[in-house]
Amino acid sequence: MTKGTRDRSLPALSRRQFVAGAAGLLGAGAFAGAARAQSAIEGVLTAPNRGGWTDQFDTRAASVRNVASYQPVFSPSTLSAMQQAVGSYNQIAMSGGWPQVPEAGKLQIGAQNQAVSLLRQRLAASGDLDRSAGNSMSFDTYVDAAVKRFQARHGLPADGTVGEYTYKALNVPADVRLMQLQTNIQRLSAIQPDPGRFVMVNIPAASIEAVENGRVVQRHTAVVGKIDRQTPILDSKITNLNLNPYWHAPASIVRKDIIPLMQKDPTYLTRNDIIIYAPDGSVIPPETINWQTDEAVKYLFRQNPGRMNAMSSVKINFPNPYAVYMHDTPQQSVFSQLMRFESSGCVRVQNVRDLIVWLARDTPGWDRSAIERTISARTRQDVNLTNPVPLHFTYLTAWATDPTVVQFRDDIYRRDGAEQLAMSDAQPTAYAAGEQASADLPY
């Protein structure tokens, strides 16, 4: 799979409000209500010579900055914004959708190509480019800014270059995007956000929000589960931090990963500071195991704290039936990948120390300096949080905290019901019973 770089306050919403909002949206008068809301917006954002709403769906200048928001995905306004967006996308679909952009190689600023004219029409239909920019074949600075805005909304590198994944995102039909929005409204309506502080992991976006008093105070890039080792959807509370943790490889990792690695490189365990223990606690030398069989599965594999540890500096714990957790990683380069679906079910967190300082701030004796000092000393230490922080792992491939800035992501686990929404070529495989992985490899 091609890899590259990737981009990136309101009171809590009660379950009753969510459900009521969703019911209103999905009912018979949903689109009419959304259209009225859109008309109200257009009344405020009046512009001369306006045609249908698609002429200037977003009258603001195309800008990547306009895509970013401090408003949480789990907020009272999200459902309302999605409702308005559904009304708008419904009108696009009923009007015949937007044009397909033929793949004409990489398009970027300075290009002259017939496909650029269709690209302009496509970007104008979704509000990324003002209609006044025209339909010329020139890829100018206006198109460059509009492409960057479109890419930011779709979780793609906002580099202004139209390549493989940008073409794929551009050419998802409007009615499919409409269905995607409706599907995610149903998902969101079933969620009950927490008042005060909480952490939300959005699996398709491979991103994390730390929320406090209705505002995103931290946003982290994440790495989540592979297609065949999926990160589960769950609700829990973060209760405990392990600083400089041991890593224990579950049987599924030993069978699927460590045994094949040892077959290729008998020094793998030694190089990664992983020790094998028998049930009686005695140490088993790696060379005494037959790596051509599953013999190794009956032993305990433990990696010592240190720079090679799979969890690096910290493990973030929360009760759950899947034995998954969040953690640091020694391989920071994975956070710059476009497709960050690389783990065995757990969630790796970029800039994790900022997050754990925020989590532990109410726990006496554990400010940033104490945490950094402990990590630097390579001292194994558990920190029980005085105030556990609610945590939500969710699966949202579409959302809008602003009705004119609709976010879409790859349906990596293929749960939205349309093959075009899964941009990657990888195919999922079914789990064997009890094979949900509970940890990540050391890289």
Image (cartoon, rainbow, N blue to C red):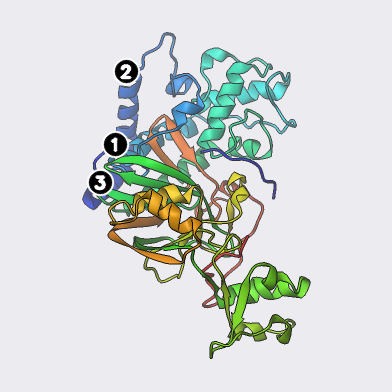
Q: Position of residue 225 (x, y in %)?
A: 54, 59
Residue 277, relative to residue 42: is it above or below?
below
Residue 294, relative to residue 364: is it above or below?
below
- Kindly report the distance in space between the C-alpha atoms of the residues bearing marks 1 and 3: 11 Å
Q: Amino acid at mark 3?
A: Leu
Q: Which residue is mark 3?
A: 13
Q: Amino acid at mark 2?
A: Gly
- What residue is drawn where x is 59% and y is 47%? 420
Q: Position of residue 90 (x, y in %)?
A: 43, 35
- What residue is drawn where x is 39% and y is 54%? 370
Residue 154, relative to residue 269: is it above or below?
above
Q: Which residue is mark 1?
A: 9
- Kindly report the distance in space between the C-alpha atoms of the residues bearing marks 2 and 3: 28 Å
> Which label sits in the foreground, 1 or 2?
1
Q: Of residues 281 and 423, which is closer to you in this image?
A: 281
Closer to the chain start, of discs 2 and 3, is: 3
> Which label sits in the foreground, 2 or 3?
3
Quadrant of the image occupied by residue 47: top left
Cβ atoms under marks 1 and 3 closer than 8 Å: no
Q: Which residue is mark 2?
A: 43
Determine if residue 240 is in view.
yes
Left or right of residue 138: residue 418: left
Q: Quadrant of the C terminus?
A: bottom right
Callout 2 environment at 10 Å: few (<14), some (14 to 19), or many (20+)? few
Instruction: Name the element at disc 2.
Output: helix
- What residue is drawn where x is 43% and y is 19%? 59
Residue 46, relative to residue 372: is it above or below?
above
Instruction: Name the element at disc 3.
Output: loop
Left or right of residue 289: residue 183: left
In the image, which disc is placed on residue 62? Answer: none
Quadrant of the image occupied by residue 283: bottom right
Determine if residue 200 is in view.
no
